[in-house]
Amino acid sequence: MNRLPILHSIRLGLLAAAISASFQATADAPPIVQPGAPGESPRVLSADEATAIADTRFSADDARFMQDMIPHHHQALLMSRLVGERTNNADVIDIAGRIEASQGDEIEFMKTWLESRGQNVPNPSEHSAMHMSHMMAGMASPEQMAALAAASGTDFDRLFLELMIAHHEGALTMVEELLEQPGSAYDPVLFEFTNDINADQTSEIERMNGMLVALSSDPRAGLAAGVFDAEEAILNLTKVASLKKPAGFYDPENPGDLPHPMFETESDDKAENPEEEDEESASGGDDRRAPLLSFANTDMAFRDDVLVTGSYHGFNVYQLNDAAPELMASIVCPGGQGDVSIVGDLLIMSVEQTRGRLDCGLQGIAEDVSTDRFRGIRIFDISDLTRPVQVGAVQTCRGSHTHSVVSGPGRDGKIIVYNSGTSVVRDTEELEGCYDESPGDDRTALFRIDVIEIPVDDPSKSRIIDSPAVFADDETGVLAGLWRGGDHGDETQETRTTDQCHDITVFPTANIAAGACSGNGIIFDISNPREPERIDAVTDEGFAYWHSATFNNDGTKVVFTDEWGGGSRPRCRAHDPLDWGADAIYDIVDGTLVYRSHYKMPGPQVDTENCVAHNGSIIPVPGRDIFVQAWYQGGLSIVDFSDSSNPVEIAYFDRGPIDEDKLVLGGYWSTYWYDGRVYGTEIVRGLDVFELTPSEFLTPHEIAAAKLANQGEVFNPQQQLPVTWPAEPVVALAYIDQLNRTSLLDSTLVDELTTSLKDASTALAKQTGDRTLAKRLGQLGKQVRRVSASGQDEYRLSALATVLGDIAMRVR
């Protein structure tokens, strides 16, 4: 007999009995039932109880926000009440008074709001009752509050501003997290309150940052604004030349690329990463809303005595000489980003924007799908530098943001290039084989780089030969095998998903490459340039976007940069973390990346200056690891990272903001050392040229030795070749200066070395042989080798002995 219908009838009967016993409804009103969890008896609700469950007038998140904000505001009051007896700084006193008045009133408002809704009103002093992390809320710790109470004068001012800025930013985080919750801030009063907090505290943060900058003793702090007449600060450098952009590469009615007043409040979200494609403004046509990057200078490449500066508008060719570079030709070919590399008589250019046309046309492209659109790698014949000819073009699915010349031309006459596309994937109707990230579709153009082959004899036949999934999981093969995006926990940076490389810098002599790949720093084995293999990958809790990578001269270290804010935001303010938007320095040990330190340009910048780590290169001082880096409107900074764990700034240059009141994208895109000078491309202004000057950090011998360095005939941004130094006395003297800093050589030996090298200079100049001098130099080299040392000094001693031996051979 089937028992299921009987059991079912029994259960229904029991349920009906339970409902009947529990219902207290009137005869003329149907019951309102809440079933409860499995196994529980249902219960009857009143109409008021039922509607309270779904009451949209305020949510539990709203109440919790108010309950948390009360003790948060209370701590700001406590901090502000310390001001009167500890400083006479009128600005600090004024802003503390404003905070005390406004946040005191807001506490009373929040109490009333909670009471009127029957919610618990917390004791303001009970910070421990807050539902969110104190660190996320920007709350000062008990130790920090004690330090603030113990401080006075300028020390108090600085600490008060630093803590209060963090406190205000915590309040903004609390508002942001509330508004991310479904159904939150439905109450118009609460919504208006959150808007007031955003507006008031954002404004106060900007004001307090300006006050912090004013307290700084750094000469870069508080420089006056101007497009071409901004105030400047410089240390241990001489500015040799400053060239404005050539005609045709700027808007003569708006040379500073200032936003139109009608549209200067455009969404910050659009400007968060200026290097990414803005699909609306890049589609062509007369878009008066968005001058952003239309004429922006970008990266540089060098060959012999020629400099090519890339631009979103095309590129410019300069002749280098002892004075200022001279413009030879301007080539208009819009499409951004315009990064350039040179191989022989070929120039390679990256194109990513949707306005780019195969014919270099100025009219752009408005259609969603077009056979005229070009996004990828352009190839020009520059045998005639004044009339370059486009001879090849490789279309790619995500365009070309940057590219790296990896090898060639080899015996087969072919160049291998890695392409990094970071923009949206093209429609397959426009370029066959392009697919996005549809779940389960391994054909996606994401999570890949492109390997491109360029035949020198016929660049028109250039093509993609592979698009390896370099981020795939080694065991499972899943394409998204590295960082999936998000933060690393409280007080860590929100980091982009690793589905692209921004820069890949190759170091061919060591068969390695370093990839700055959005969410990871990566080392590749490029023994076979056509088949790069990932050998190590690292993350950094403070990095938002791994942007670029540079090796030291022997390929044993890598400097990675973090482009926090995408290059368009002020990220070098006095209160910004020193490990966000910074460099991360890694040693390479047995093929793995070992973290050593962070470095960030220390000169505080204001809210109208976009500033974050960007492109740079090694300065070839023998025996030292020195790096020159662009920081957008933070200027340029030169840092010695010979001790990977203790980088030290040794020179800088900075200008005031482009505009005093508005944040305008500008500053240095790249700063590179080439043939004895530092060249910097300014996004808005043009091109600057600098020379090093002697200081406590660099001796005349070290600077002279750097100028003698052999960099080869070509410098490409993402192709790094080790430099060498000739066997010249000044190179030996540079090593001696370095060894003298650590007092490693006794004074007698130093005197003998200096005298002998001076004699060698004379002999070499006269081109006369001197066997006695040669023998003496050889003996001195043996003495140097007997000196005991470790680390960098051990290398310097060995290099000095080798140079002495080579000089001895020359003067024999």
Image (cartoon, rainbow, N blue to C red):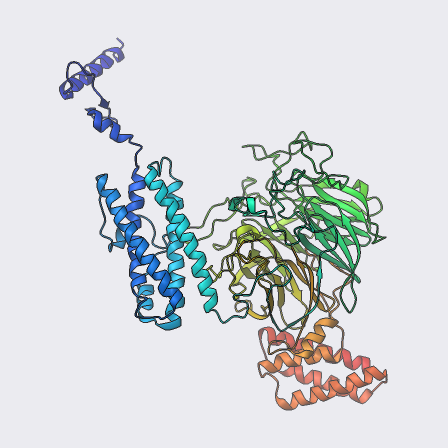
- Where residue 710 sits, quadrant-wise, is bottom right
The image position of residue 616, as x and y in percent, is 64, 60
Farthest top residue in view: 1
- Where residue 746 sits, quadrant-wise, is bottom right
Closest to the observer: 13 or 260? 260
Q: Would residue 451 be found to the left or right of residue 86 on screen? A: right
Q: Indicate whether 697 appears above or below 73.
A: below
The image position of residue 206, as x and y in percent, is 45, 57
Closest to the observer: 206 or 306? 206
Q: What is the number of callouts on the image?
A: 0
> From this viewpoint, is residue 429 visible?
yes
Q: Would residue 576 be found to the left or right of residue 387 on screen? A: left
* Quarter of the image that includes the N terminus: top left
* Quarter of the image that includes the C terminus: bottom right
Query: In the image, what residue occupies the spot 73% across and 77% down?
Result: 803
> From this viewpoint, is residue 637 visible?
no
Query: In the image, what residue occupies the spot 60% across and 40% down?
Result: 446
Closest to the observer: 361 or 581? 361
Q: Indicate whether 782 appears above or below 615.
A: below
Query: In the image, what residue occupies the spot 37% across and 55% down?
Result: 135
The image position of residue 383, as x and y in percent, is 85, 53
Q: Would residue 284 be found to the left or right of residue 68 on screen? A: right
Closest to the observer: 19 or 58? 58
- Where residue 678 sits, quadrant-wise, is bottom right
The image position of residue 577, as x and y in percent, is 46, 59
Q: Would residue 552 be found to the left or right of residue 218 on screen? A: right
